[in-house]
Amino acid sequence: MKVENTQVQMRKGILEFCILEIISRGEVYASDMLEELTAAKMIVVEGTLYPLLTRLKNASLLDYSWVESTSGPPRKYYTLTETGKAFLEQLRDTWQELVESTDFIIQNKKAN
């Protein structure tokens, strides 16, 4: 078993949460999301990001608007809907619980 496979699965498991967190700060362009995710070592390619954004849009968690660009075609900027904000709050709670549970397990050293 390769550790890389498990690492990839762990990253995939929190990708949606990370994307919603990035969008929660305000209007954001997809390439800016990719840049931040890459800087955070969340290795993501466009072929992963765009279908996920579409799924989140179809679930009414985010919306987008087209903004004219001075250097090319219009850009699609994403924002969270009210439903998306509530969903993200639930994910934040779940994330905190997972961190606490994982820390507990890691720190729990039984005496032999």
Image: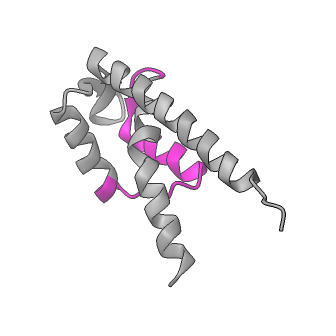
Residue 81: give x, y in percent of width and height. 28, 19
Residue 89: give x, y in percent of width and height. 43, 23
Residue 22: give x, y in percent of width and height. 47, 32
Res 98 quadrant in image? top right
Chosen colour scheme: one colour
Left or right placement of residue 20 versus residue 95 in this view = left
Res 87 quadrant in image? top left
Residue 16: give x, y in percent of width and height. 38, 43
Q: Residue at x 26, y 27 (%)?
A: 61
Q: Is residue 48 above or below residue 55?
A: below
- State which quarter of the image contains the C terminus: bottom right
Residue 54 on the magenta segment: no
Q: Is residue 5 above or below residue 90?
A: below
Extreme residue in the right direction: 111
Q: Is residue 21 above or below residue 85?
A: below
Q: Residue at x 74, y 53 (%)?
A: 108
Q: Residue at x 33, y 50 (%)?
A: 49
Extreme residue in the front direction: 112
Residue 26 on the magenta segment: yes
Q: Is residue 104 above or below residue 41?
A: above
Left or right placement of residue 77 versus residue 21 in this view = left
Region of the chain picked out in magenta, as a range: 25-48
Res 30 quadrant in image? top left
